[in-house]
Image (cartoon, coloured by chain):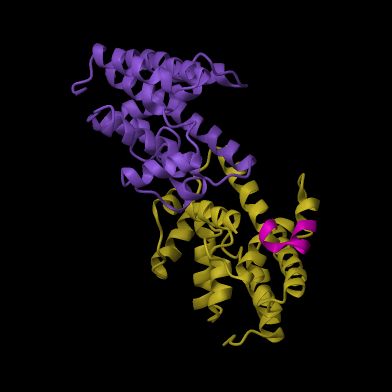
Chain colours: A yellow, B purple
């Protein structure tokens, strides 16, 4: 139904998701859409694609482990050992499946941007990079270094993604969590450019 | 010639390597052998194996990129994209090949401890863990946190290895270097225990 994605699709998705999301999460979602829109304009990406991905990226973020696993089963989502143990990493994959099956999104770039917005991955498209990065720099984010990252995002998308990946990895290491190999592979790839 | 590895083997290796190593590197090597000996005693590992691995682990550390690549060619050492770009990561593999081909070491545990002492890997043996860790806590090492790590090493080998892996990863990330997937896999494995 939402192919190709246009202004009406975006309005419809926005209206559909609001009642199902916590207010704070919805505000963050709108922030990501705004930041992604700015980056899409800067780098010549499709603003409807970035908007659709932004709106749906955190749709499953507040799902419990049990809810996530129900969707994993329902939509035959492929997982791995790390994803099963660090179940919060699953929310992107679940949101991508919901986007496809329940919102009728067929655009592969949009679905991948939703799926990999938490870990990143090797070979990210422009839309994926924009969503990954916007999640860190949307107007509601406040942390030491965010202004530097916002500035870098407008100057050099790849360098900013590299910085965001590195920041995330250091955070994961410091907090004693499992680190997904997709994040390492994404960072190494950016570093080798 | 050195199978099984005994006291005489260790003396012979020590005498053979000294003239080929920088004084500071040789001192570090003896420090690693000492620390590894303490951990071998603590955890019931073979002290001759840990000593042989300790003595030879950094044998190729001061080789130039060109020298390392000559050995890669000579002994048909398997590399990967990361190892080729971050050539300093190659010195363990080169030292393991030299240990096998030029020092006659056949013990697989010793060879693997030398090979993976820089990156670590999933499925490290006791000897590998001891060498990996001793490299960080030998008496010559001085850095914030080393005393805590020395203490932890005597209490819980796996926890200490996990801490050393995490410290290394944070250092690599902060200094903008490529991170080898073996290190991530080693840490995730330790964390899942």
Q: Quadrant of the C terminus of chain A?
A: bottom right
Please tell me whether residue B37 is drawn above or below residue B76 in the rendered image: above
Q: Which residue corresponds to the image point at 33% horizontal and 33% vertical from the top-left?
A: B98
Q: Residue at x 34, y 19 (%)?
A: B16
Relative to residue A15, is residue B95 depicted above or below?
above
Residue B185 sits in which quadrant? Answer: top left
The image position of residue B149, as x and y in percent, is: 51, 21
Figure quadrant of the N terminus of chain A: bottom right
In percent of the image, x 27 and y 32: which residue is there?
B100
User: What secondary structure is the stretch in magenta mostly built from?
Assistant: helix
Foreground: B137 or B187?
A: B137
The part of the chain drawn in magenta is: A151-159
Quadrant of the rendered image containing residue A6: bottom right
Question: Residue A89: horizontal and vertical position, in percent?
Answer: 52, 54
- Of residue A187 and residue B10, the one placed in the foreground of this image is B10
Membership of A152 in magenta stretch? yes
């Amino acid at each position: 139904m939402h192919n190709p994605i246009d202004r009406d699709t975006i309005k419809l998705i926005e209206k559909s998701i609001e009642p199902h999301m916590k207010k704070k999460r919805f505000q963050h979602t709108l922030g990501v859409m705004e930041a992604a829109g700015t980056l899409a304009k800067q780098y010549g990406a499709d603003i409807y694609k970035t908007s659709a991905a932004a709106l749906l990226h955190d749709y499953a973020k507040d799902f419990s482990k049990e809810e996530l696993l129900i969707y994993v089963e329902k939509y035959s989502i492929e997982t791995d050992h790390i994803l099963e143990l660090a179940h919060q990493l699953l929310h992107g994959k679940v949101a991508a499946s919901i986007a496809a099956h329940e919102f009728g999104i067929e655009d592969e770039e949009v679905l991948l941007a939703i799926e990999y917005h938490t870990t990143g991955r090797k070979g990210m498209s422009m839309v994926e990079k924009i969503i990954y990065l916007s999640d860190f720099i949307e107007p509601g984010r406040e942390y030491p270094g965010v202004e530097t990252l916002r500035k870098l995002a407008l100057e050099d998308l790849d360098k900013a993604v590299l910085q965001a990946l590195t920041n995330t990895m250091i955070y994961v290491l410091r907090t004693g969590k499992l680190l997904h190999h997709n994040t390492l592979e994404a960072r190494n790839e950016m570093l080798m450019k």
